[in-house]
Image: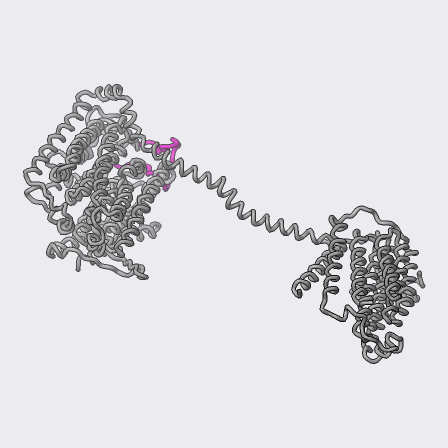
Amino acid sequence: MTATSWAWLVLLLPLLGAIGIGLGFKLLPAKIAGILGTATIGLAFLCGIGALLCLLGEGAEARHHASSLWDYASVAGLNIKLGIYVDPLSVFMVLVVTGVSTLIHLYSYGYMQSDQGYHRFFSYLNFFVFSMLLLVLAGNFVLLIVGWAFVGFASYALISFWYRRTTATRAGMKAFVINVVGDIGLVLAAFLIFREIGSFDYGPVFEQAPQVFHTNQWSVTAICLLLLVGAFAKSAQLPFHTWLPDAMEGPTPVSSLIHAATMVTAGVYLIARTHTLFVLAPTAADIAAFIGLATLLVAGTIALVMTDLKRAIAYSTMSQIGYMIMGVSIGAYSAGMFHLMTHAFFKALLFMAAGSIIAAMANNQNIDDMKGFGKAMRFTSITMLCGGLALAAFPGTSGFFSKDEILAYATARGGMYTIFTVLGYFGALLTAIYTFRLIFRVLPGKPCAEAQELIDNGHVAHEEPRNPATGEVEDTDVGFPGAEHHIAEQTPAMKVAMGVLAFLALFAGLIQVPGVDETVTHFLDPVFADSPLAAIVPSVGASWLGLAIGAAISLAGIGIAYWLYVLRPEAPAALIRRLRPVHTFLFNKWYFDELIDVLVVRPALAIGRFANRVFERFVVDGLVTGTAETVRGSGGVVRAVQNGFVRSYALLLIAGFAGLALYFLLSSS
Amino acid sequence: MEAVLFFLAAIGALGGAIGVVALRNPFYSVLALIVHLFSLAVLFLLLTSAFVAAAQVVVYAGAVMVLYVFVVAYVGGGGESAWEPIPGQRILAPLLALALFVELSIAVLSSALLALGTHGPDVPAGFGDPAAIGRLMLEKFLVPFEASSILLLLAAVGAIVLAGRRREDGGAVIPSGHSAPKARPDGVAAPPSPGVTQ
Amino acid sequence: MNVEWYIVLSALLFTTGAIGVLVRRSPMVILLCLELMLNAGNLALVAFSRMVGNQQGQVFAIVVMVIAACEVVVGLGLIVALFRRKLPLNVDDLRELRG
């Protein structure tokens, strides 16, 4: 079996799962559907391992293969194949995606047990994994766009999974529309690439790009900027980020898989994959890095004041992806990809833990109401702590090694890029603070009512499910969350998934310790070897210095959070009172939603109204009814000739005769 | 001499024509037409068409006009109202007809037919005599001659049918003692009418 | 006399008859004006026959006279029929065939 055959299997299995579960939802009992869904992804993961082993068996230079099944379109210079591209970068992404997806499927097997839409959920989830793998394995830009669009659809389907809630459907539409804006950028970039280079396949494009473009030529800058539009829309960076917090309307496994671990990292993958073009357009790369930095800081500040548990974690995701984008834009490719991997672990874990807590709170997501779950849910709180430590880059955890590696690279690149280091560390401080704000508010302290009920009776709080927008009682048929909620302590499947992720969150960093073993860097080297930026390697000393600074900042952040939320619980309220305008500004998410409403939504609606009232009525209808009226009018005129008076008919006769005589006179003269 | 006669006859014809068109009372119009016809007969004579002139007087002015007089006496001559229901008719009609006249005149007067500018060839003595016309009609134009006589017959029959009275069931009354019943789909013959009616 | 005088006179009489047909409303008078037009045609025929020098035009004129007579007969018959049924003797009022 070659690497590409393993890769085709990786693609095939989730697709079969999606179709099988989707079509057989009446035949398959729920449990079997869940097992089937998880198994397909698990098998895909094993095939990914197979592909990895095949690649490792070859020399470093030979580790890229393209394979195509058939031609899509082969006409007039256009040659699009159904082709995949297997190289270390795609295999890395495949392993991350399938690995985390398997665990999340396992989690959903338990968490979504009483949801009536169980089969639909697993079908959609499998389809999502298939699309993400298609995106990652695509060997040409066309298939990339196909995977990109499928992922957007899967995200929409899963966000609006509980479709009877208007909040969910609106959030789904918002996500989809913003994704489409990104799609436009991506498609235009593909067009430009084809126009300049003449091919869509990765191999020819990246080989010929350095010859076709010279540095900072407007065409390659335009291509990169358009690619960035696509990447930012998918990865929820400024200014296309407003869909991500609303996407938390979907079930928790969806948030954890799509909006933490995999889909939102597609932008990072895109920039890493097209790094050859970004090297040729340093301006665009710098713009990307600055936007990543800006997102990092903006999202970090918003997460400080968020009171909805899942939304706070969503902003944290946005912030961390800012790190990744920053990383791959300034040249820290393997560091960025490594952070992608570790972030997938601990963010997915955090979402899972949050899901467990929210289930215990009977779907109430407000952290103001949560307290004291440390005692009530031991396992959940331990895993949450593991995830939080990794997120805050506590020394020794995976997040520690990955995040600080990016910042060390920025220092090594020097010059303007030290700004990234400084502000990156500030962002790390914010990260630590808001992460432990969440942990210290939810876990320790006197248990709240729901937590107390868990401690006393082992009974999960239950409330009539209510539509969050209207407050009316929902019926728990398809389209709503299930009647019962499942917490990790009571569901073995959830426990296994969370346990594995906790272990990875804590210890996965050890594969990339600077100076000791840099497996990720070595593995991804051949992919990025053609970039001059990859040659900038921070020295081991500088890396350890960066790690030390990072450790200090992380501990400082945890300390601040501890002081604010455990030692002096009344201090945050006083701070908010003092800094009320700042707090309002941050609480309203920097007013981005309102800004986009004014800049984009209102003009679009106004154009629509104009089109309807003016253009449609006067121009289109005018043309159509005008034509009809003209015909009717001329018909009326002609009809007037037939008035029934013989004498007028005779007049016409004479008139015709006179005319004829005139004609003959003129023609014979 | 000939010119004088021509102009006199022309004035008569024209006057008669204008009289027909302009006079309100139909009876007067009929009389004007008779004047017109006589003038035309004179014109025919000027053109050495004796037989046609005679036929004009005897047939046209004699028989047809008498018919007209009968009908006008029967029907009565009412005037017409002055209001014209068709907009523009009173203006357009003379205009167009005049245009037609102008075109015809131009066609005639500017025509390359040189013969029009002459009197015509010298004709033999019996030109236009009944004998000559009769010979033509019975030799060369026999078929048209016979066809027109059939046409006369048809017209006469048609006139009788048209002017006869209608019975209640829609059949016609022909004043010969019989009646023509209206045809029925089932082919049943209608009962005969009780006697001659007029 | 030049033949063209006769032709022009015939045209004049023809147009007079045409005006009469178009302007008058009584069927009687319209028939009379039709006679005018026919006679104008006759005049033209006879004039041309004189110009050409053979008598075929005159025979034609006789046939036209026959036709005029037939037409008058039928037309008057129609008028009498109209009068009998007490319909208005006004061409404008008989317009069942309107569009």
Q: Is residue A20 a member of the stretch shown in magenta?
A: no
Q: Is residue B62 left or right of residue B100?
A: right
Counting from the top left corner in percent of width and height, residue B98 is at: 75, 56
Q: Is residue A243 above or below residue A532?
A: above
Q: How is the image coloured?
A: one colour
User: Left or right: A79 with respect to B98?
Assistant: left
Nearer the observer, A253 or A490: A253
Locate residue A446: give its quadrant. top left
Task: Describe residue A613's horizontal placement relative to residue B59 as left or right.
Answer: left
Q: Predominant secondary structure in magenta? A: loop
Residue drawn at x 78%, y 64% as measured from the top left = B185
Which residue, as the protein is rendered here, is positioned at the far bottom?
B139
Front-most of residues A304 and B116? B116
Say above or below: A92 vs A563: below
Residue A196, percent across and down?
27, 53
- Does residue A60 appear anywhere in the picture? yes
Q: Residue furthest front?
A: B1
- Across and down, in percent, residue B194 comes to 93, 62
Residue drawn at (72%, 52%), measured in percent from left and top?
A643
In-front residue for pair B19/A526: B19
Q: Residue C29 location, x and y as percent?
A: 84, 56
Q: Which residues are magenta?
A: A461-487
Front residue of A491/B110: it is B110
